[in-house]
Amino acid sequence: MKTKIQDLIIFGLIRLATYFVVFIIAYILMDIIINGIGVISWEFLTAFPRRGGSEGGIFPAIVGTLYLVLLTIAIALPLGMASAIYLNEYAKQTRFTHMVRLAIITLAGVPSIVFGLFGLGIFVIFLQFGTSILSGSLTLACMILPTIIVSSEEALKSVPMQFREASYALGATKWQTIRKNVLPYAIPGMLTGSILGIGRAAGETAPILFTAAAFFFPRLPGSVFDQVMALPYHLYVLATQHPGMDEVRPLQYGTAFVLISLVLGINIVAIFLRSYFIRKYKW
């Protein structure tokens, strides 16, 4: 009886904590939606900023964010998945690989501002890419790479060993086994974890603070070596450093609404991709 009462109390506390977190998140989202949806218009989404960002739209920031995200995907996704395949399928389980995994897990918990400073030192200054889309995307790729590797490796581990053994018994090579018998069943988890990491990258400010972003850059970038406006940094400056904060408050909410919608869209894509591959490769 005493154990049952303790279980009920603990379960109740956990449920209360969950409801509290959900309430806080719902309150923040509702505040942004209520105050931001009225700002959204065709002009706001397609016009260039004017008067130092206090008027006009956020079209260059939307395009710049998409550029950063797409280049980050092109860099981090194949590199992260290939690393996970090597660690799980090819590398021998030695002390060295254990240390590599420990380093990857540790990097996944490093604050994003540290990656921003790393990108400034390596890509902007040492490699002389300058403050550019390329520097920002490489920095974001370094930030989400540990997440992609960990989630991809866990997805590969979830595929039963019997799938591999049956393929080897039929004479298939290791790569044929991975490509035909492992990846089709691991890809839902690999893509889901990877796209969720990319969704995080789309909303980060610190990594692009020193490497890519400009607050007022009222034109579209011509190459990957140009600076770019980005929604997270644009929102950060509007909310903390703009001289007329009260004047631009509607723009703050509108930018926040667009940014959340973009991140939500990326997460929805992850859900649909996972559902598609689960239906295609049931096991």
Image: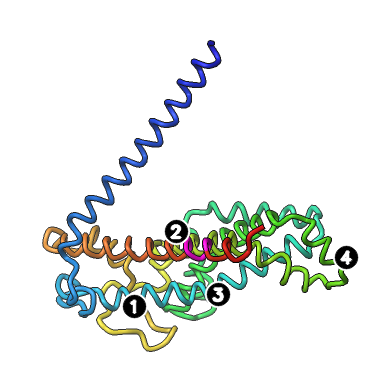
- Would you name the residue on which mark 1 appears? 63
Tag in front: 4 or 3: 4
Task: Answer above or below: position of 208 versus 102.
Answer: below
What's the magenta region?
270-275
Q: Secondary structure at mark 3?
A: helix
Estimate the x, y position of residue 127 in percent, counting from the top left: 54, 79
Q: Is residue 9 left or right of residue 148?
A: left
Taking the spot 32% from the left edge, 68% from the top edge, the residue there is 231
Q: Secondary structure at mark 2?
A: helix
Query: Closer to the N terminus: mark 3 or mark 2?
Result: 3
Specify whether residue 61 is in view: yes
- Figure coloring: rainbow
Q: Amino acid at mark 2?
A: Ile
Taking the spot 28% from the left edge, 51% from the top edge, the residue there is 29
Tag in front: 3 or 2: 3
Specify the label residue 75 is tagged with: 3
Q: Decide: marks 4, 3 in contact (CB < 8 A)?
A: no
Q: Decide: marks 4, 1 in contact (CB < 8 A)?
A: no
Estimate the x, y position of residue 27 in percent, counting from the top left: 26, 45
Q: Which corner quadrant of the image does residue 234 belong to?
A: bottom left
